[in-house]
Amino acid sequence: MEETAKLIVDGKTYELPMVRGTEGERAVDISKLRDETGLITLDPGYPNTGACKSSITFMDGEQGILRYRGYPVEQLAERSTFVETAYLLINGELPSREELTRFSVLLNDHSLVHRDMLHFFDNFPRRAHPMGILSSMVNALRAFYPELPERSEEEEILVTFTRLISKIRTMAAISYKLSRGHEVIYPRPDLTYAANFLNMMFDSPVRPYEVDPDVAQALNVFWILHADHEQNCSTAAVRLVGSARVNLYAAISAGICALWGPLHGGANQAVVEMLEDIQENGGDPGPFIERAKDRQDPFRLMGFGHRVYKTYDPRAKIMKKMADRVLKKQKGSDPLLDIARRLEEVALEDPYFIDHHLYPNVDFYSGIVMRALGIPTNMFTVMFAIGRLPGWISQWKESMDDPGWRLQRPRQVYTGPNERDYIPMDKRK
């Protein structure tokens, strides 16, 4: 017997079908609610609304679970690579050795950007934010790489996916180099995805960069942990824009813009800015912790708590290990990292933070790791975007393949004036 939920309105009962996910989640299907009742639901911010069915990522905020295609993120971070994880997200299964080799070769082949694109980079104001540049340049890729009619649709999509994953890393490094007034460093075929990015960022004709395996691994893990996170703000933006059947470049550009926000992808940058604020005010995190506990104070302690996770963010545990490993390699002392350690120690022992589930989240540790790797603060969100790209692509692909696809068009509850007549200018008060 089909499971249903009953809705009683004005004495009339309506039965709404129930939907059950593979992990036991239950949802009330309201897709025909307006047709049958004339009603809509109101859910500001959509915390109680399922916008789609998806087989990509499962997360349980109460138990601290995150899995990509069924694989625990802890196992992927320990055993996989970002390239392999990207393949998994997009294709649904882990690759064979031959499939992974082919994917890696394609990433290498598409790693260069069209020389004419450098003119675009050169003409951005030097103070332009890297996320604005990245969003614009991803959108511009469509003009440089239009669809090729001689390719099959499957081939074209595969090339588009690999082109984006490969070139986004190159374009991010180019934007950084040009902002410094340095020569552009191009990718090398002998380096892995993460090592290549680090080399493009930091190599110099006067000071050759030597890739530290632990540093490259920390970046690799950072990207794996950020590869997808269910229907978050930027992913929802990619699906929403993609539902208009725009090209993938435009949908990804929209996701980058959404990720730019300080409450989403910019949170790790906000953590470092908060640490700088603590340093400028004497370096003692105690007063800031007290302010965070004061309900009358609008101050927020960045990097603690999460919209979904009500326990320790599983990604934070892994990122903390990476932070500890990278910090051991630091030759000098960084006062911000010292403040972060003290802040973490106090918060983890404070009953208020424990009772309110305000554990350090992935943004707290990833901001520390990015700083330890030498990544400039304004590039933090760009790093997030590179990692999230496979998730955006897989979500876009899933929505395109969905037989129940519909153009996304939320409703509203209107609260403005009722109908009124136009008032001529000379009669207005």
Image: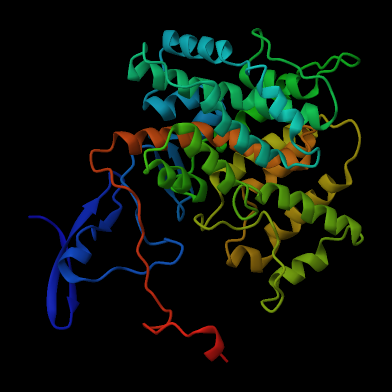
Outermost residue toward the left?
Answer: 1
Q: How is the image coloured?
A: rainbow
Q: Is residue 140 left or right of residue 284?
A: left
Q: Please state the horizontal and vertical placement of residue 213, each as a whole percent of the image.
A: 71, 19
Nearest the viewer among 140 and 35 is 140
Residue 173 visible within the image: no
Q: Is residue 182 above or below residue 74?
A: above
Q: Is residue 158 above or below residue 405?
A: above
Q: Please state the horizontal and vertical placement of residue 408, each as a whole percent of the image.
A: 35, 51
Q: Is residue 108 left or right of residue 55?
A: right
Report the residue at 36% width, 43% height from top. 243
Q: Is residue 364 left or right of residue 334?
A: left
**Is the C terminus in the top left, top right, bottom left or bottom right quadrant?**
bottom right
Nearest the viewer among 164 and 140 is 140
Q: Is residue 71 above or below residue 347?
A: above
Q: Is residue 3 left or right of residue 133?
A: left
Q: Please state the horizontal and vertical placement of residue 308, each as a whole percent of the image.
A: 49, 56
Q: Is residue 425 above or below residue 190?
A: below
Nearest the viewer among 304 and 280 is 280
Report the residue at 66% width, 41% height from top. 132
Residue 372 visible within the image: yes
Q: Please state the horizontal and vertical placement of residue 261, each as a whole percent of the image.
A: 62, 52
**Is the N terminus in the top left, top right, bottom left or bottom right quadrant?**
bottom left
Determine the image quadrant of residue 26.
Answer: bottom left
Q: How many marks on residues?
A: 0
Report the residue at 84% width, 23% height from top. 182
Outermost residue toward the front?
Answer: 426
